[in-house]
Amino acid sequence: MARAQFRNKLLGTAAVAALAAGGLISTGTAHAAAAVPAHAVTGYWQNFDNGATVQKLADVPDDYDIIAVAFADAAGTPGAVDFTLDPAVGYGSEQQFKDDIKAKQAAGKSVIISVGGQNGTVSVSDDASANAFAASITGLMDEYGFDGVDIDLENGLNATYMTKALKAVHDKKSDVVVTMAPQTIDMQSPSTEYFKTALGIKDFLTVVNMQYYNSGSMNGCDGKVYSQGSVDFLTALACIQLENGLAPSQVGLGVPASPSGAGSGYVEPAVVNAALDCLTKGTGCGGFTPSKTYPGLRGAMTWSTNWDAASGNAWSKAVGPKVHGLP
């Protein structure tokens, strides 16, 4: 169950081992991060070619406020990650990629590095791996100018040590943007490892964009079972997070940009917009209506900007203005 079902495997390098062992490498690319808008659209940018539109960061529409570069993968040291720019995306050099990051940031966007994906095997399960993870993330932020990190680990997560690792990143980078993309099963209860991690970093967590797709039926906050592909699935599952400790500004709706972006669970942009209205204004609801409204809801996420482009950017053209027009 993943956004990246067609993704290529990225290769780590030995450079991260040095980061973990001997401190952080700074290349002088630090910058003052732009504040994430109160209502934001997140999009994943594919660092690989899987049949979606191949694009550079400069091609990502302005409707996206947070661009998550997918993906960083495990390196040689347990817990450490690294990023390798895929030649398939068309950059002539890494410097061109870094320049595109800076240009997006100059336009007020946040560009972050996503860790994991469906095939990601990063394990942060003890003090050493937590330290290595934090060191490698801050190292990538320094090297590429990333504003933060997205946690998209779909093969298990240890709340104790991931929380420790993310707090260490925040200690080094106080303005870090931290997003998460758990699967639906991972956010059914505050007792799950993903939910515990989100609550453990609540004082600096930017947003949890749960994946409302590639999922079976799930319980809503009212105890009823809902099937994916409906407005009720989006609203009743978001309610669990909203009523169990996360601020509305830390909750986003993660959906595929097109039917090709996921194995199941695609909904038309109009359904996403109805769910946003239901949660923020109490209108547009289906069979489930929340007991209160959450006007501070952060917004929406999609996999991916590339699949969006393959459909003429229909998703971002519809959902972007809706998110940015929320109360």
Image (spheres, rainbow, N blue to C red):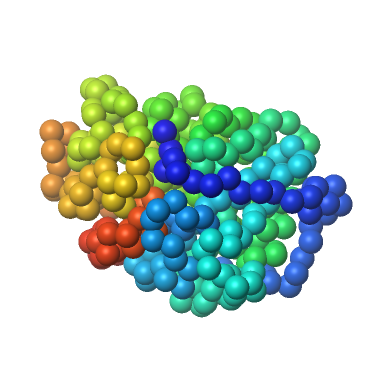
| Residue 289, image x, y percentages | 17, 37
Please tell me which residue is depicted at 53% across the width and 47% down the height of the picture.
8
| Residue 253, image x, y percentages | 33, 46
Q: Viewer-proximal residue, 170 or 210?
A: 210
Instruction: Tell whether 22 sits left or right of 155.
Output: right
Q: Viewer-proximal residue, 249 or 300?
A: 300
| Residue 137, image x, y percentages | 67, 52
84 up-or-down from 227: above or below: below
Q: How many marks?
A: 0
Does residue 85 appear anywhere in the picture?
yes
Q: Viewer-proximal residue, 244 or 65?
A: 65
Does residue 294 appear anywhere in the picture?
no
Quadrant assignment for the C terminus = bottom left
Please tell me which residue is depicted at 38% across the width and 36% down the height of the picture.
241
Q: Residue furthest right?
A: 22
Please tell me which residue is depicted at 52% across the width and 77% down the height of the picture.
103
Instruction: Tell whether 320 sits left or right of 120.
Output: left
Please tell me which residue is depicted at 44% across the width and 51% down the height of the picture.
50
Instruction: Tell whether 310 sits left or right of 202.
Output: left
| Residue 219, image x, y percentages | 30, 25
244 up-or-down from 49: above or below: above
103 up-or-down from 226: above or below: below
Quadrant assignment for the N terminus = top left
